[in-house]
Image (cartoon, helix red, strand yellow):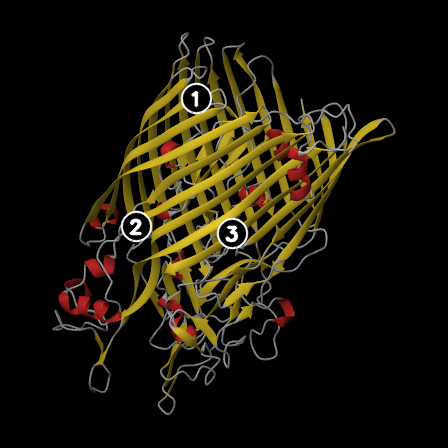
Amino acid sequence: MKRSTRFTLSSAVAFAVAGVIPSTVTVAQESAALEEVVVTARKRDESLQEIPVAVSVFGAEDILMTDMRDLEDVALHTPGFQFMNQGNQQPGRYNTQLQFRGLTTAQFSPSFATGALFIDGVYVLNGGTSLSLMDLERVEVIKGPQSAYFARNTFGGAVNLITRDPNAEAFGGEINASMSDRGRTDISGLIEGPIIKDVLAFSVSGRFYDKEGHYTATDGGRTGDEETTTFNGVINWTPTDNFKLKMRYSTSEDDDGAPSQGYVSGIMNDTCTGTTVNSAEGPANPVNYICGTVPYGNSVTVDPGSNIISSNTILPVDMSDLTDPTTNIDGVPGVTSIGMKRESERFSIAAGYQFDSGYSIDVSYGKNEQEVNWIRDFDLSDRLGWWSRDPQNMDDESWEIRFTSPQDQRLRWLVGYSYYEQEFLASGSGGDAATSCFAFDFYGYSDAYPDICVYSFFDPAIGGLGMGRPGNALGIFRNNLTNTDQAEVSGVFGSIDFDITDNLTVILEGRFVEDTLIKGNSVAGTGDTRLEEEFDDFLPRAIVRWTPSDNTTLYASWSEGQIAGDFNTFYAQADEREKAQYIAQDSTVAELLDAETLEAIEFGWKQRFWDGRGQMNIAVYMQTWENIKGRSSFLINETCRAGDIGSAQCPDGTLGQPKATYPADGGDAIPFFNSRNILIPGDADIWGVEFEGKAAITDRTEVGVNISYIESEYDDYTFNFVAPIAGFSQMSGNQTPRQPKNTMSAYVSHDFSLFNQGGYWRLDWFHQGESYVDESNLAKLDSYNLFNLRIGLEWENLMAELFVMNLTDEEAWQTGARWTDFSSPSQFAFLTAKQGVAVSPLDKREVGLRVNWKF
């Protein structure tokens, strides 16, 4: 099988020098030039080395030879792009995030994501979860605001998956299968061919992926099991050379077990107490938390005398309320054990016609549906304390039409209109929570009763109260769908490219957008007041491109991005007495938050060298991010409403009175406080540098490197979740969390001959720098390095490969985020008093065999 290998060089300096100074290095003259790559990041075909946008591209051959399986693999190879299955606080494949250039969000709803996924240019809500990289022509990772062409949620960037067209001339197919010593099986296949030769073609593809988790929980169960089954079908119709219609349908099912997760308790691993840190509010003395590197492995203390990460994979029999198929969200799959089930369907149709004059018209339509349900060990410990069920149902629908002028003219233009609507129903970031036991620690004596699930108790001497027994359902706390929302977005977009000279071009792009956000009973039927707001704006991008030679492209751009604002739902529905409590805790609280905005400036240099055998791309960017949706937690003594009457806090006759706890002995009522999340807007500045390069050193060897450096700083950001442990809530001067400053990757690939048989080997290196787990910048995850090795032999249409993932068996936390310590006795500041870090470990070393056959 003939291969087109690609790569990047191991020294950025060497690339830069090679691009401007004649090389004295002797390179084999028979070395083939790197393949020209065409991208559609601006809704038209353009050369990767000439488009004035930062784009990373992976073709079908790249995907095959690196065995990219999902977006996590894509992110490892892409500077400035971060994607991990634990997108925020929830380990596993439940709630992922696409992050670009330091832009991360604490919002649960994908409606407010800072990055977006597209398939053939069609937006897919929450599309990154468990997505398979099969049946693709290429992957385009487009960095920086892309509002002009891709609209919603492309605030920081976009990933566009371009699917392959079926072969209209002859029948054929492909099978790719791999197995490993860790129990991972991944089999995919495709069959394609003509229905009417050269006119109507089809393809059918499928994938079965089954992964056995690499870790064992305290109860003996395995964590990290994943299973995905996917089927795709494509019809491609080209009745003339001028017209093309492509229709695609995809269905997928996920069935995962308990995720690989751990919890590093701040109290048990306290390195903060006794230290002093500088904050925007002055010197602070944090307590009961981790200051510095989050410990790993035997360095972690879970319980006295224990050095393991504890968790549960078995749901107690008495928690039947969580397995009841009836939820407050219709259509989600039933779950009867700890784990996740997801069902997804996607349909798209696109048609294009090019007139003989060079003008063209393109129309596309897409619809996506996704239902998911998940039961998890909510306290992330082996204590039988808390579980939750988190159902979601989401669907989106969109269409677009655009007209494009001939691309061989001095003045070129594009104009279009798009419409998009979505509905996202979710049972909250805490879901329907269930507990078998919990305790209140009124005065902070955390260790007085460490085994709170052993028995019920009340100790007035220290102010301790415990209730429940392990495995027995003490209470179910239903979520009221506060994370539910609906959006309707329409926009007119366009661009003008004008060549001032043969090598100097000015480009103006923009979109007029109307983004309507709806919350309340019109969406979820919660009975709450309907909340609706429209966020209108013009989102521009201006670019100047200079091509002083055929091998050099220089550009400068200025652009703006927008994410719709949001409602402080609890505050908007509060009465005057309740609102006064919010204002007393923060005077800036408002019912409505303005839209988030991003102003970005970018300078780029794209260079070919060594007669086309090498290329490098450098981008330098500066971003101003305003109205960031920062979360804080407020304790509110709410008023008894009609729907509350009959509850423990609102017995008969208390309508309109403050909620309270009424002692059985008839004593004075004790005010009852609810913890309510409130959004407070903030600002940040971010700048960074990205480098990508690759070169064919000889006709058999390619090498390369990718580098990203991100410098971020909050100008103003309130985050009071950490106030009880950190001693401050203003994050000004801190770095944005969950994205490292430094990431790097490099590889070398070499083709060889063995007994007149073709072969290859490839070594990849990935480096992830330190990253903070939350906005306080107290706890951080250590850096780590991954090495992957592949050695294979090739015949005509057959490839067989031996691979080793995580060659050195690196042990580290892949990612992590601050999480409330639900397993310890709680104080009345329920969600903030005791905290730790929810973490996901790296997969262990894995050895396997992969076979690819094309026929």
Residue 293: x %, y % from top left? 57, 67
Q: Which residue is mark 3?
A: 710
Say which of 140 and 447 sits in front. 140
Give the quarter of the image for residue 349.
top left
Q: Amino acid at mark 2?
A: Thr
Q: Which residue is mark 2?
A: 484
Say which of 837 and 142 sits in front. 142
Q: CA distance from mark 1 to mark 2?
A: 47 Å
Total number of numbered discs in the rendering:
3
Along the polypeptide, which appears first: circle 1 or circle 2? 2
Q: Amino acid at mark 3?
A: Ile
Identify the element where label 2 is drawn.
Answer: loop
Identify the element where label 1 is drawn.
Answer: strand
Quadrant of the snapshot with the C terminus: top right
Quadrant of the snapshot with the N terminus: top right
Q: Which residue is mark 1?
A: 499
Q: Amino acid at mark 1?
A: Asp
Along the polypeptide, which appears first: circle 3 or circle 1? 1
Residue 119 in sight here: yes
Name the side, left or right, on which 392 lies relative to 784: left
Disc 1 vs disc 2: which is toward the camera?
A: 1
Q: CA distance from mark 2 to mark 3?
A: 33 Å
Say which of 14 and 419 sits in front. 14
Along the polypeptide, which appears first: circle 2 or circle 3? 2
